[in-house]
Image (cartoon, helix red, strand yellow):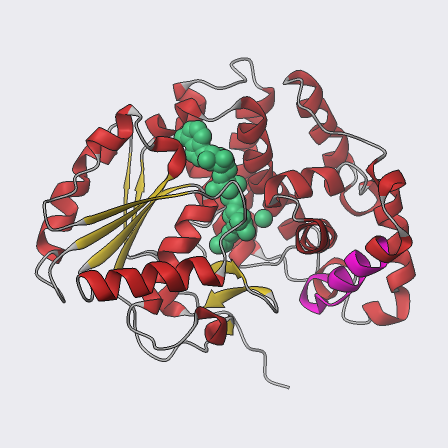
Amino acid sequence: TKTMHKNFKNIDKIVYGKGSFNQIDDILAPKRVENDKFMVFIVDKYFEGKELADRIPAHAEDLVFFEDIDQYEPTTDQVDNLRDKILAEKGIPAGIIGIGGGSIMDIAKALSLMVTNEGSSQLYQGLNLVKKAGVYHMGVPTVAGTGAECSMTAVLTGPVKKLGLKCDWTVFNQAVLDPELLSTVERNQWFYTGMDCYIHCIEAESGLYFNAYSKAYGDQALSLCREIYLGDNAGQNLENDEKLMIASLFGGLSLTYSEVGACHALSYGLSKILGTRHGYANCLAFYHLEEFYGDAVNEFKSMIEKHNIDLPQGLSKEWSEETIDAMAEVAYNLPHMWNHAIGLDWKEKWTKEDIKKLYRRL
Ligand code: NAD
Ligand code: ZN
């Protein structure tokens, strides 16, 4: 059989550095002539009334939405409603700018596709289902680690599935990586989302699809994570935020050219069934996966200890058999992750029962 290698669409342009947020207006200027000639800013509600909100370069014709992502992770309804509102009010925007973490960036990515594609975003959850190119879109991360700034997916939860709108058009045209924006992230959140990056790299290197491309990015991202979370200057400071912004990007690229494994499979089960947040769910699972990730789990534990992070144990005592079963069902149905983690013959070595045993450790 013919080997099919990934042919991956990258971000068109990246600006990086302290204060680069101030360049957004100049970057958008030449794009403002497109479509109905206005921009839409999707901003994490956290920033409403904060200093950053006053620095958003919105013109009179632009729309600014402060989106609450603390109640639910991004949903298909949320994106559909925003789309309907924008089209009814002003037409097709010249561009969409997402200012926030993985949740907000995913909303901005999905919205950029949905202003040109008809029907509900539910119709497009999956690979290459989107019919038309979207509009120009820019990602401005304010919490770092997910790699959503560079990935080709926009993860949405719908009534039927939690799945990404995944195609070349999903990838941002522009990323603005300003480390200063990370300064206000709460310590636990800084850790959970940052560990998403660490775990992407560890999972990418622990399996079948690992290769020199993935390794080159992953090694760099891991060494940055080690400086940020374990080095002499460990902790939240500007120097480390400059590193974390790049670690997140490189971790995302490492993962893109390889695959995640057991930890993300368990994490998806937790998110889907219990609504547990992605970064936090990863941490809950990773703590107990020594046979998959060896010394990295000990390293992870020393990071938890150093930063005095809340990570509860004994959660599974509260879970019913049905809950554990439902989570294992979700995790089992991610064959690409088990192919990577265990091998193409994983179904002969690995069962839903084995996955349930892992959940019972949590
Ligand atoms: P998030 O966007 O969910 O935000 C987490 C919390 O941090 C929120 O309470 C938010 O208000 C707050 N916050 C954000 N920036 C802040 C700042 N500068 N100061 C203070 N508070 C701030 O966090 P996340 O971990 O970046 O994203 C998780 C989401 O990303 C999940 O919905 C997950 O599905 C998605 N995700 C997507 C991809 C992808 O490739 N598209 C990859 C991984 C995860
Ligand atoms: Zn992840």
The one of 21 and 251 positioned closer to us in this rendering: 21
Per the picture, the main secondary structure of the magenta-coloured stretch is: helix
Is 265 placed left or right of 316 in the picture? left
Q: Residue at x 11, y 51 (%)?
A: 61
Quarter of the image for the C terminus: give it: top right
On the image, the x and y values in percent for residue 71 come to 54, 43
Whether residue 181 can be seen here: yes
Whether residue 145 can be seen here: no
Is 121 placed left or right of 89 in the picture? right
Q: Residue at x 54, y 48 (%)?
A: 72
Q: Quadrant of residue 283?
A: top right
Q: Residue at x 51, y 40 (%)?
A: 70
Q: Is residue 236 above or below residue 297?
A: above
In the image, the segment drawn in magenta is: 324-337
Is 89 placed left or right of 316 in the picture? left
* Residue 327 sits inside the magenta stretch: yes
